[in-house]
Image (cartoon, rainbow, N blue to C red):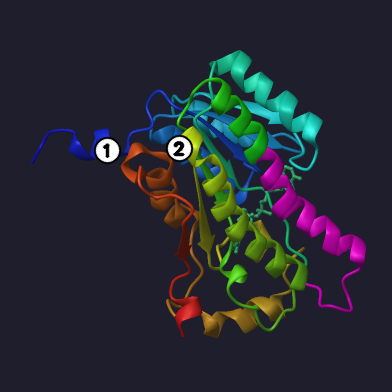
């Protein structure tokens, strides 16, 4: 066995990674594990990500806590400038911030529909665009990873969530389109599409009623939701040089949900 082969292939040593919505849930675990793989981390959140930073620094990593709403161009720009001032470059972006409303066509207001698209789709677009600008300026062959969802492929049951599903389908095609537009700059853009993952979004009783959780239970072919940790291998692969030829692709990690 070649010494350090795996380590060298997947290492993020020397890279700087931005994770949006990294104050909790999937984003927190991704931020922690990108740091474990060697990256210096910056987190965008609307209300602070002190717990995530403490977690990373407690393991000897580096992390910045930046208040930035991903839907606000000025805040995103300012946040990226803070990253450059502290670390000098930006190599990896994980566009993770997102929201979900369990409302059908008649329950959701147009404002709620727009808000869901604004955060899940336009927010990812703004962060990708502003990150790509600095990657191009600094001649960095960056990797942008958008979090989509299996809801891009299916309409979940029994809850209705047209805005969320539409926003995530948009993320997948936006990913392909951005990959095409940025390929000449050596910036890769890919997405991952998780099935249900046990995070506040999917198990917090303030958001998901116990009856809905009970209705989901028999629908999991692997008899459980994913843990956020189970997405990390794909994220590290996409962030690292190991995935050089992966571009404009979506990786579905749904524990067979959409296959049955
Ligand atoms: N949990 C699941 O079952 C599941 C499944 C598929 C995809 N996803 C996607 O994974 C991502 C993370 O979800 P999660 O389950 O960890 O949810 P979560 O609600 O636990 O975390 C989402 C984070 O994004 C932040 N956020 C929301 N809007 C923001 C904005 N405008 N600017 C900055 N931060 C913002 C929230 O404050 C929160 O900290 C989302 O894009 C979600 O759609 C989740």
Q: Main secondary structure of the magenta part?
A: helix
- For marks 2 and 1 on the same chain, the one whose residue lies earlier in the sequence: 1
Q: Residue at x 55, y 27 (%)?
A: 135
Position of the N terminus by quadrant: top left
Q: Is residue 174 left or right of residue 105?
A: left
- Closer to the eye: label 2 or 1: 1
Q: Is residue 104 magenta?
A: yes
Task: Give the magenta range.
Answer: 102-127
Say if residue 199 shows up in the picture: no
- Taking depth in this image into account, of 137 and 105 the one nearest to the observer is 137
Q: Residue at x 72, y 69 (%)?
A: 208
Q: Which residue is mark 1?
A: 9
Q: Is residue 43 magenta?
A: no
Residue 117 position (above or below residue 19): below
- Taking depth in this image into account, of 38 and 245 the one nearest to the observer is 245
CA separation in Å, label 2 and label 1? 14 Å
- Taking depth in this image into account, of 85 and 30 the one nearest to the observer is 85
Residue 65 position (above or below residue 235): above
Say if residue 10 shows up in the picture: yes
- Taking depth in this image into account, of 134 and 4 the one nearest to the observer is 134
């Amino acid at each position: 066995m070649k010494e350090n082969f795996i380590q060298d292939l997947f290492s993020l040593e020397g890279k700087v990674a931005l994770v949006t919505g990294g104050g909790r849930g999937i984003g927190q675990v991704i931020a922690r594990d990108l740091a474990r793989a060697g990256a210096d981390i910056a987190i965008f959140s609307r209300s602070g990500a002190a717990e995530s930073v403490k977690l990373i620094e407690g393991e000897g990593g580096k992390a910045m806590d930046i208040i930035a709403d991903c839907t606000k161009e000025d805040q995103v720009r300012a946040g990226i400038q803070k990253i450059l001032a502290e670390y000098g470059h930006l190599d990896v972006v994980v566009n993770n911030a997102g929201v979900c409303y369990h409302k059908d066509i008649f329950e959701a207001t147009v404002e709620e529909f727009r808000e869901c698209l604004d955060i899940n789709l336009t927010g990812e677009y703004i962060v990708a665009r502003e990150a790509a600008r600095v990657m191009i300026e600094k001649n960095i062959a960056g990797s942008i990873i958008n979090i989509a969802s299996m809801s891009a492929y299916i309409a979940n049951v029994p809850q209705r969530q047209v805005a969320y599903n539409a926003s995530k389908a948009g993320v997948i095609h936006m990913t392909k389109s951005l990959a095409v537009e940025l390929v000449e700059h050596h910036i890769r853009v890919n997405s991952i599409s998780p099935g249900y993952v046990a995070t506040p979004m999917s198990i917090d009783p303030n958001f998901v009623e116990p009856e809905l959780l009970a209705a989901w239970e028999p629908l999991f072919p692997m008899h459980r939701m994913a843990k956020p940790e189970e997405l990390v291998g794909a994220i590290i692969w996409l962030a690292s040089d190991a995935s050089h030829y992966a571009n404009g692709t979506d990786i579905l990690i749904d524990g067979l949900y959409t296959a049955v």
